[in-house]
Amino acid sequence: MLGLLFSNLSIFLFLMSNSSWYLKIWSLSLISVFSFFQLYSPIFSYESFNSLISQDSMSLVLISLTFWITLMMMIASQNSVKKFNNNSTLFSILLMMLNLILITTFSVTNILHFYFMFEASLIPTLLIILGWGYQPERLQAGMYMMIYTVAASLPLLLTIMWAGSHLNSFNILMTANLRQEMMSSFYWSYNFLTLLIFTAFLVKLPMFSVHLWLPKAHVEAPVAGSMVLAAILLKLGGYGIFRAYQYFNYYSSSMTILIFSLAIWGGVLTSIVCFRQVDFKSLIAYSSIGHMSLMLAGAFSNSSWGWAGGLVLMVSHGFCSSALFALANYTYEKSHTRSLLLSKGMLLILPMLAMWWFLFCAINMAAPPSINLLGEIMIFPSVIFSSSYYTLSLGMMSFLAALYSMYLYTTTQHGGSPKYTKPVTSLKSSMFLLLLLHWIPANFLIFKSELIFLWI
């Protein structure tokens, strides 16, 4: 309820502050700080259900992440959007529409409402990509994103409608009874139901083999679109998997073993694909697929440590990938290219930007004291204890994550200095503020690690 209240209040402040971009940022920052401090209040540490909404610590953490990243998107879009006053108002309205949709998705108890909001988040994202994208290929990227997500979620809609007519209720807490009814019939039907329900979430996550829309969308999206895609929209898939797993109890479905294996070896393959990229936004997008594969392995490990580590990895990836896309945008503004082969020697020209590249590449490879390390420490034992056959793939994924993070840093920062067509100007204070506000929670949230266990 508090997240919905904050979101409605932020929309009101946005509409009232139609003429000032900075007033919008200040109003959103105030609401973001309030939503962050609610995590430290004992009142909101326990589940509280009513007929419409439910909030536990998992949904509260994701709601706070949504507000925080929305503020970061506003700060990052100053140079590209604020110059055009007519478009800046529309951009702000789309941003707050997306904010309200995401907060509602993380709060509703009606599974039909959840599906509606799950799909409605595509519309503002598509408009942001089409309206403020860089190249004409953004039309193809938007089409890829829509076709993949909508086509994969239609089986989920059919399953929801069938379950609602069978149980006479669309409450997500009542869907646990569906498992007993399916297990009483043929065993293959329960495996088929597992595939139908998880397909929509696996595409949104995305899992390897249904991931082709994500690099295209990231490459063509503006900086705000890339930040919200990586930091929040990918978490919708993880949130849906956790909720479906929590209430359907998929410990006996053999289909989960297939998804488990495909996810964890797909993470290894996408980590290898990172070395074949020449666009650093595409490389960061493929690294997101690898991290989400590790989160999916924790979700399917059938252990409380795996679930808690998956939530930690979702939050840490939200801060880290959002900051990496912001850094990629700042590098693009200075070098006027996204090619790894041409963006060399930035350490000689902008050493402060190189320092931030190093800090967030270190977080991306799970270096201490980031919460990314906490998530991997919790996921690795839970996955190995579930099956020792995954030890090799986990080790390769961890090694390759460190390798492509160092590859990303050394390729862009070291080497010969390129001949730029325009003089490189100094960095603005808003960039330092943006990166600092990503770095602080990505490292200091480890002091509030008990939040991740309260929802299990």
Image: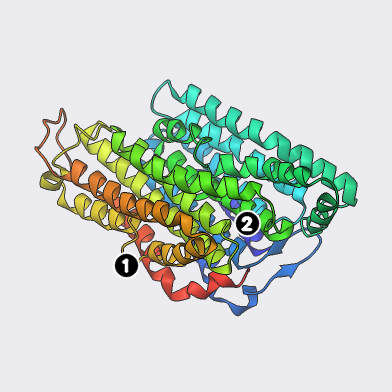
Query: Which of 416/23 is in front?
Result: 416
Instruction: Residue lying at the far bottom in this picture: please name it.
Output: 42
Circle 2 residue: 242
Where disc 2 sits, the SS reads helix
* Residue beneath the point at 51% across and 66% down: 36
Furthest residue toward front: 389
Q: What's the CA distance linking mark 2 and mark 1?
A: 26 Å
Question: With 195 as the anchor, is 183 left or right in this view?
Answer: right
Residue type, numbered disc 1:
Pro
Q: Amino acid at mark 2?
A: Phe
Choose between 207 and 164: the one closer to the eye. 207
Quadrant including the N terminus: bottom right
Residue 93 visible at all: no
The residue lying toward the viewer, choosing from 75 and 217, is 217
Judging from the image, the colouring scheme is rainbow
Give the percent coordinates (x, y) of residue 204. 57, 41
Horizontal side of 151 relative to 218 (left or right) equals: right
| Res 340 → quadrant | top left
Q: Is residue 423 left or right of residue 368?
A: left
Relative horizontal placement of residue 352, taking residue 270 as reference (left or right): left
* Image location (x, y in percent) of residue 68: 48, 57
Compare residues 73 and 16 and report the one nearer the observer: 73
Q: Position of residue 17 (x, y in %)?
A: 52, 48
- Secondary structure state at the residue bearing disc 1: loop
Give the residue number, with chain letter if any, for mark 1.
368
Q: From the viewer's perspective, is residue 100 above or below residue 200?
A: below
For label 1, count other residues whose C-alpha is less than 10 Å away and answer few (under 14), some (14-19) or many (20+).
few
The reply to whether residue 249 is in sight is yes
The disc label shown at residue 192, or none: none
